[in-house]
Image (spheres, helix red, strand yellow):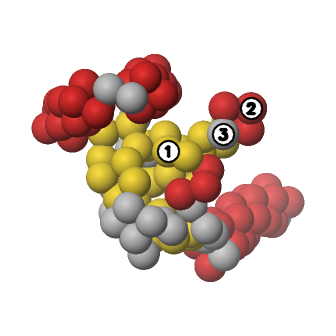
């Protein structure tokens, strides 16, 4: 009888953990139109073009990233889930509702 109680208890704990995670999923909203990339390196490269003031290189690189699926465009009001943070870089990885991957974007883009 003891093993049945411990199995039931384990199942209850797992169920509670799952339910708690779903019930209190902390979703966020995109503040303004922005973009994110699956790789911090690609995101950093795009930021570098912006810092250099090279708008043409930025547009080309972002277009290639979006077309390949490596980057994604976000619209103001899009709901996303915060999946990872990189505090010192000022980036967060967000997963749009229904998406399987997260994309690194500026922490300021998310509220």
Question: Distance from label 2 to label 1 (Cα)?
Answer: 13 Å
Residue lying furthest front: 53
Q: 80 left or right of 73?
A: right
Q: Nearer the viewer, residue 84 or 33?
A: 33
Answer whether labels 2 and 1 touch (C-beta < 8 Å). no
Label 1 sits on residue? 105
- At x 34%, y 66%, the residue is 75
13 above or below 64? Answer: below
- At x 56%, y 70%, the residue is 27
Q: Is residue 60 visible?
A: yes
| Position of the C terminus by quadrant | bottom right
Q: Nearer the viewer, residue 35 or 19?
A: 35
Answer whether labels 2 and 3 touch (C-beta < 8 Å). yes
Label 2 sits on residue? 88
Q: 52 left or right of 60?
A: right
- Mark 2 neighbour density, 10 Å: few (under 14) some (14–19) many (20 or more): few
Q: 83 left or right of 73?
A: right
- At x 61%, y 50%, the residue is 107
| Position of the N terminus by quadrant | bottom right
Which quarter of the figure has residue 22?
A: bottom right
Label 3 sits on residue? 90
- At x 23%, y 36%, the residue is 59
- x then y, percent, for residue 42: 39, 24
42 above or below 84? Answer: above
Q: Secondary structure at mark 2?
A: helix
């Amino acid at each position: 009888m003891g093993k049945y109680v411990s199995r039931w208890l384990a199942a209850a704990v797992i169920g509670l953990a799952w339910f708690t995670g779903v019930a209190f999923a902390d979703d966020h909203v995109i503040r303004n139109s922005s973009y994110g990339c699956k790789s911090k390196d690609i995101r950093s490269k795009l930021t570098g073009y912006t810092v250099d003031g090279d708008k043409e290189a930025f547009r080309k690189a972002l277009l290639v990233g979006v077309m390949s699926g490596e980057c994604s465009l976000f619209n103001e009001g899009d709901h996303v889930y915060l999946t990872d943070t990189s505090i010192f870089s000022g980036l967060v990885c967000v997963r749009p509702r229904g998406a399987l991957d997260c994309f690194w974007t500026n922490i300021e883009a998310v509220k």
